[in-house]
Structures are given as C-alpha cells and as structure tokens.
Amino acid sequence: MSEAEILNVEEAPKTSCPKVAPAHKEGQQAEVDTRKNLIGMDKEDMLEAVLEMGEAKFRAKQLFQWVYNRGVTDFNDMTNMAKPLRAKMAEHFKIERPTISVHQKSKDGTQKWLLKYDDGNEAETVYIPEDDRGTLCVSSQVGCTLTCTFCHTGTQKLVRNLTPGDIVGQVMLARDALEEWPASSIDRRLTNIVFMGMGEPLYNTDNVIKALKICMDGEGIALSKRRITVSTSGVVPDIARIGDETGALLAISLHATNDELRNKIVPINRKWNIEKLLEAVRNYPGLSNSSRVTWEYVMLKDVNDSEDDARQLLKLLKGIPSKVNLIPFNPWPGSEYEQSTPEQIKKFADVIWNAGYSCPVRKTRGEDILAACGQLKSESQRVPLRLQKQFEAQRLEKEREAGLPSI
Ligand code: SAH
Ligand code: SF4
C-alpha cells in the first residue's frame, strides 16, 4: 500500500509537561529537574514518596487514583487536595507520558504511536479496534536481544529495557487518544492489552510485572487480568512468575514443532528446548479450560506450514488447555521468508480445528502504516544484500551476547 493511502500521519505535539529548561548562558548553573515522575510508581512507591514529603498516608491513594484512574496531567485538577498541597505536589512530582514522535491512523482504525523516551530511544505501541474489543499491543523493550529470523525487531542493534513508567505510559497515552478517562468508565474501547510489541517481556520481567500490577489495579488502570496477555518466545525460568505474581494470560511464540527448526528460527530454543517449554506451560499457574494458553504460530511458506507440522503441533499440545493463533508472516524489508498461501493456512487451520482447538488466523491490521506483528520499526524500502549480511552479522553477535549456544 502506498504512502498516499495513509489516512493521517501527524507529527504530534509533545504530550508531557515541560521540563525545567537548562540554562545555557555561560557561568549559569544548569537547572536540574528533580521532580519524580508519578507514572510508573506503584502504590508502595507513592506511599514512600508522600511520607518522605511529610504528608499523610492517604494522600498516596489519592495520587494513585488521580494519575492512573482519572488520567489527570495537571496537579490543579486534583480537587480533593487544597491549593497549597497541589503546589507542593507539583514541586516534587511530574506526571509525564512518553513523548509522541509520530502518530498514525490506518484506514482500518488501527493506530500506531512511535514514542520517544527521555534518552532518545524509541518504541512503538499499536491500538487495534475490533467489533467486540479494542486491543493495545505494547512494547516491553527498545529492540530485542533475541534474533528470531522472521522478526524485524530482532534485527535492531540497540536494546534497552523499558521501565514500568515507559510501559504504563503507553497505555495511558492510548487512553488519552481515545478520550477514555476515568479508566473505570463503562463501554471502554481499550479493553485488552497484549505484550506483543517490541521486545521480549520475560527478559524484562521485574518491570513488566510492576507495570502489569498497575494496569490491573481496580483503583488504577482497572483492566482485568483475564484481558491481559504476556507473550514470550520461551524464557522458561520466568514463565511461572507471570502467572504467580499477576495472573495474566500466557501466549507462547512456538512457530516450530521440532527442535531442529525451532533452534534456527527461534534461537532461544537452543537454551530452553520445546520439551522444557512445554513443561513450563503445563505448570503455568492458573492454566485451565477458561484460561487457556495461546500458541502463536507464524505461517512461513514451505518452512513450517505443512499439514504434518499441524499434526505434530497437535501432539505437542495434548493435555494442555490451549488455543492456537496462526499469524500469516508479515514481510519486512530484507526478510528472507514468504507468507504461506491462504490455501495452505486454511489446510493447516483445518487440522487444528478438527481436533477441537480454537484456531483463528490473525488478520493483518494496519498494513498501510506497518503496524502488524513483526513489522515494527520497518522502513519503506527493500534492504540491499549488503544490509542483509549486516543483519546476519548482528544476529550472530547478539546471540553470542545473549549466551545462546551456536548451531
Ligand atoms: N518477544 C515476544 C513478544 C513480541 S513478538 C515474543 O516473541 O513472543 C509478538 C508476536 O509477533 C510473536 O509471536 C512473534 O513471533 C510474532 N512475529 C514477529 N515477527 C513477525 C512477523 N514478521 N510476522 C508475523 N508475526 C511475527
Ligand atoms: Fe524478540 Fe519476539 Fe521478535 Fe523474537 S519474535 S526477536 S523474541 S520480539
């Protein structure tokens, strides 16, 4: 689809409060902004900060509600605090969302935000409206240390973990755009969150768990744990923590049904193979027929899409409350795969479906704004061979750094 078909690309204004500007004149000391950002703080952090200021305990709860449930950005709107207290709060704290670099809206209603954090790093968030729900796909890292061969995010060199505030900020920013404050209002459009944007959530588990708890708090962002899904490529040791500490739903990026292929396309398999992964899923806290695990399976033409593969998949899932989500491969500049044909996807899906599993094929959304899975941070041109070789070299380097045994 051409650039011209993009409905709306706007260079968005900064949404955050202005920072204390540094002084540039010679001899003048640069002013440092010492205000703590409330976004990203949980109830305990706020309590600690309020007590440090010499204020009463109950103020922490009020702050929490104003920030996460009402979505206020200005301390003057905190009407259950007297004016002098509001001023004091504003001296100590700020309520700052990530800065929006670009905000795009697709013809199909999908919205994508490119966000810039204070250190200049960027990550993306995508909102996908459907008839019965609205899902926000959030990023957990800038880039990804893993190097799944079909994923564009994996080719990015730069990686850093997003903080709880960076993550929760994505949800708040989407709520701003959808004008959905207070968070607990009925008929919300943003109903679900999936950790399927950039990054591997379980290589940033502590921050992801803290963000999840804020999102699930009834006095905060107030989304049910049954509506939040964490997707992992298979960081086995941390899988149970998500269930134990948050109760969120689990999705596993399986993509291959034997170790030989999975070692190649999902390299983390060399560290934790399919058998270990299945064991961790079987033991996932809270797994039941009403809280099934989602197996994500990217459909790569002639690589993993045969009916034999589908039958092998059924063998693996046996006894595990499961649903399967087939994702037609989304190409990106320089990618080495092709999308399976619709006929082949149907044949694969039929095998799964006939065995009694739900097996939706994920619709590609926001294609005109490159908002689909694995396309995040794409460029519009085809990448020359020279760059493809560079990607490959980067992959090997990142795999070494991540401690993955080579194949
Ligand atoms: N790192 C986590 C979550 C982010 S990726 C994970 O791997 O699970 C979210 C989903 O998009 C994963 O299932 C991933 O394998 C899939 N994906 C990545 N690149 C893709 C592409 N080009 N086409 C289709 N799906 C892709
Ligand atoms: Fe990382 Fe997930 Fe992409 Fe693999 S699929 S490189 S784990 S973001």
Image: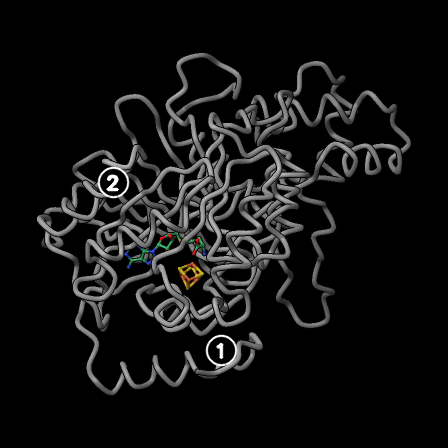
What secondary structure is found at the residue carrying circle 1? Answer: helix
Determine the quadrant in which ligand 1 lies: bottom left
The picture places residue 290, in percent across and down from the top left corner, at 47, 25
Give the residue displayed 56% in from the left and 57% down from the top: 118
Give the residue displayed 31% in from the left and 36% down from the top: 128
Q: Amino acid at mark 1?
A: Lys
Q: Amino acid at mark 2?
A: Lys
Q: Is residue 48 left or right of residue 387?
A: right
Few, some or many residues within 10 Å of mark 1 (<14, 14–19, 20+): many
The image's mark for residue 105 is 2
Specify the quadrant that holds the C terminus.
bottom left
65 up-or-down from 202: above or below: above
Nearest to N terminus: mark 1 or mark 2: 2
Q: Quadrant of residue 318?
A: top left
**How many marks overall?**
2
Give the residue displayed 17% in from the left and 62% down from the top: 301
Q: Give the foreground label among 1 and 2.
A: 1
Give the residue displayed 66% in from the left and 46% down from the top: 241
What's the CA distance linking mark 1 and mark 2?
33 Å
For disc 1, the marked residue is 398
The picture places residue 20, in percent across and down from the top left corner, at 64, 50
Frontmost residue, 31 versus 304: 304
Q: Is residue 45 left or right of residue 333?
A: right
The picture places residue 366, in percent across and down from the top left corner, at 22, 44
